[in-house]
Amino acid sequence: MKNKVKIPVIVVSSVVGAILIAVIILCCITVRPLSDFKDYKTVRIGIASGTLPDETVMNTYKKKLDKNLEDTGFSVMHATLEFVGSYGPEFIKVKNEDGDKVNKELTIVEARAAVAASAESYKLEFEYGSVKEYKVKGETVKYDRMMMNVKTTDGELRWVTLYLYLSEMDGTANPEAEEYRVTPVRLRMNTSPLYNALGEIARDFV
């Protein structure tokens, strides 16, 4: 009789142990959506009233900014608890005139307007020293600038859009600039720590 009682206890204990191990593993696996964009040379922080001084931001606040760029990361367990299965990166899709889904495209001017700072958000514009490549769904995006609008996600994982583009196409000097389009890329992230950090930085100037 005692052996019959022990078997269910052992089974339940084994199942509970396996679940705990799975939870620990999922908590340790971390997704870092902005890790590919941290090797920037300059960053511009836009607020509703203008742009913060580039040199001061780089000299005084770079470590703080870098730490909070890392904190946009999240554990797979966090995503699982929110029933989030897709993290990106992926292109934003729209329907064309024929009803087919195609990648959304914007001019650089339109992309800047999309990331404009407001009373409840900040604009980040990163400049890199050379042309870089970013893989999205098997396609390669070349860029040396990256822009994004940062709002709080209230600690949740939400889609955040990045705009990657080539600075040589910004303006009329390059004959190909008129036809050049930015293809927005979206990734899941928790931007609350980054949003709070940008608010602390901005308060030092306002």
Image: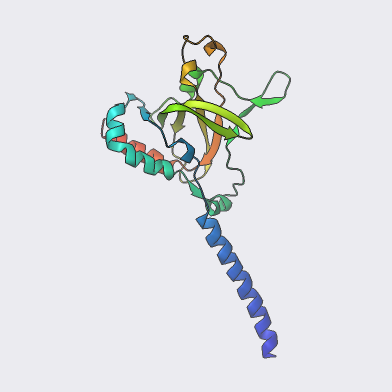
In the rendered structure, the answer to whether residue 110 lies left or right of residue 92 reads left
Q: Residue at x 48, y 38 (%)?
A: 36
Q: Residue at x 53, y 53 (%)?
A: 29
**How far across and down, in percent of the image, does residue 179 sit?**
57, 13
**How far across and down, in percent of the image, does residue 129 sit?**
41, 27
As drawn, 113 above or below 191: above
Image quadrant where residue 101 sits: top right
Total numbered circles: 0
Residue furthest bottom as drawn: 1
Residue furthest right as drawn: 98
As drawn, 10 above or below 102: below
In the rendered structure, the answer to whether residue 68 lies left or right of residue 4 reads left
Q: Residue at x 43, y 24 (%)?
A: 116
Quadrant position of the C terminus in the picture: top left
Residue furthest front as drawn: 130
Q: Residue at x 46, y 12 (%)?
A: 171
**How far across and down, in percent of the image, does residue 44 sit?**
36, 28
In the rendered structure, the answer to whether residue 155 lies left or right of residue 176 reads left
Quadrant position of the N terminus in the picture: bottom right
**How far across and down, in percent of the image, does residue 45 sit?**
36, 29
Considering depth in this image, is 178 or 15 the residue closer to the camera?
A: 178
Considering depth in this image, is 13 or 142 the residue closer to the camera?
A: 142
Q: Indicate the colouring scheme.
A: rainbow
